Image: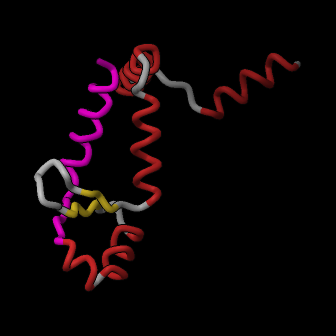
Amino acid sequence: MEITYNIMYIWEYIKKEDMKAVSITTLRSKIKYFIDMVSESSEVIIIPRNKEDDAVVLMSIKEYNSLTETSYLLSTEANRNRLRTSIEQIENKQTISYKEIEKAIQKIKK
C-alpha cells in the first residue's frame, strides 16, 4: 500500500510539470538538444513506445534524485507523519529561527 502511495505521489508530481512527448525518431535526430534541455531545466520528456504504458522518461539526474528522495521520505508512515507535522508547524508559525537556537545554546553553555 505504501509503495502505491509513493508512486501515485510521484506520478502526480510529474503530471503537474510541463511534459513533452517526443518520438524516438525525433529524439535520435536531436538527442543533444533534448539532453541539454532536461539537464538545464526540470523538464521531463516522455518517449512513447508501441504501447501507452511502455514509455520511457528522460530527465536530469537532479530531477531523478529529487524524486528518489521524495519517495524515500514518504516511504514510511512515521516519515509522512513527521513531514505533515513540520508543514503544520511552518503554516502555524510555530518555528524557531536558527539565531534563537544559537542564543539558547549559548545560555546553556554559560
Q: Is residue 13 magenta?
A: yes
Residue furthest front as drawn = 50
Q: Is residue 87 magenta?
A: no
Residue at image coords 40%, 27%: 74
Task: State the image coordinates of residue 5 (x, y, percent, origin top left).
Answer: 28, 25
Does residue 67 appear left or right of residue 52 in this picture?
right
Task: State the image coordinates of residue 17 (x, y, percent, origin top left).
Answer: 22, 54
Q: Nearer the viewer, residue 41 or 5?
A: 5
What is the span of residues highlighted in magenta in the rendered image?
1-23
The quadrant in which the N terminus is found is: top left
Residue at image coords 24%, 41%: 11
Task: State the image coordinates of residue 54 (x, y, percent, origin top left).
Answer: 19, 52
Does residue 83 appear left or right of residue 2 in this picture?
right
54 above or below 34?
A: above
Residue at image coords 19%, 60%: 19
How many numbered discs, if any? 0
- In which image quadrant can residue 7 be found? top left
Residue at image coords 29%, 62%: 43
Residue furthest bottom as drawn = 29
- In which image quadrant can residue 91 be found? top left
Does residue 26 appear left or right of residue 62 in this picture?
left
Q: Nearer the viewer, residue 43 or 4?
A: 4
Secondary structure mainly formed by the magenta segment: helix
The quadrant in which the C terminus is found is: top right
Task: State the image coordinates of residue 65 (x, y, percent, origin top left).
Answer: 47, 49
109 above or below 15?
A: above
